[in-house]
């Protein structure tokens, strides 16, 4: 079973940059990494429904895709604005990218609730620094 990482936060906060850097650093250590970006998955399934139901469906899809992987690590980066969406993913580590107060989409800003539980709260756009900190923690947990 893969070690599951959720990278969540508002659109434009830097989730994808952090995911790319974390993936690169894990692979440098010889780990296999699967990575799913929410926009790419929505495109693949042609599902652009951003209603609450559509967002929850997307979180279940991301979780299912993650659970099907055989890699050492699987990362999903998506907004996950609701607690139920974060719970659906069942991450071993949750990373909240909290670098902006508002994203590009007003409906997402209104829906977004700050997570009650997370392992990391990224507060600055420095993906190399945060990837190293997160990697150190992962090495201690996995």
Image (tube, helix red, strand yellow):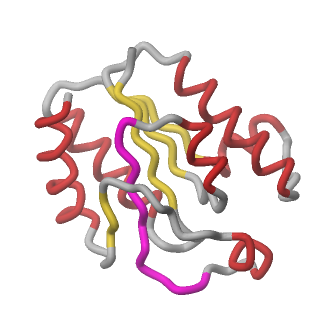
Quadrant location of the C terminus in the rendered image: top left
Is residue 109 rendered to the left or right of residue 15? right
Question: Where is residue 89 shown, x and y percent of the image?
Answer: 56, 37
The quarter of the picture where residue 81 lies is bottom right
Residue sitting at 63 percent across and 24 percent down? 64
User: Residue 66 versus residue 141: which sits nearer the camera?
Assistant: 141
45 within the magenta span:
no
Residue sitting at 53 percent across and 70 percent down? 114
Question: Where is residue 32 shown, x and y percent of the image?
Answer: 30, 23
Question: Where is residue 68 shown, x and y percent of the image?
Answer: 55, 16
Quadrant location of the N terminus in the rendered image: top left
Question: Where is residue 113 shown, x and y percent of the image?
Answer: 61, 69
Residue sitting at 42 percent across and 31 percent down? 74
In this rendering, is residue 78 above or below 31? below
Q: Which residues are magenta?
A: 92-102
100 within the magenta span:
yes
Residue sitting at 69 percent across and 34 percent down? 60
Is residue 68 rendered to the left or right of residue 110? left
């Amino acid at each position: 079973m893969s070690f599951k990482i959720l990278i969540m936060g508002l659109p434009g906060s830097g989730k994808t940059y952090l995911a790319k850097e974390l993936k690169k650093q894990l692979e440098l250590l010889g780990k296999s990494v699967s990575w799913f970006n929410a926009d790419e998955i929505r495109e693949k399934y042609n599902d652009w429904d951003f209603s609450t139901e559509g967002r929850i469906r997307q979180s279940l899809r991301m979780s299912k895709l993650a659970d099907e992987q055989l890699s050492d690590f699987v990362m999903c980066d998506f907004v996950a604005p609701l607690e139920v969406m974060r719970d659906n993913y069942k991450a071993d580590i949750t990373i909240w990218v909290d670098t902006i107060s508002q994203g590009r989409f007003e409906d997402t800003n209104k829906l977004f609730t700050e997570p009650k539980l997370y392992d990391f709260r990224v507060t600055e756009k420095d993906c190399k620094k945060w990837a190293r900190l997160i990697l150190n923690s992962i090495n201690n947990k996995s």
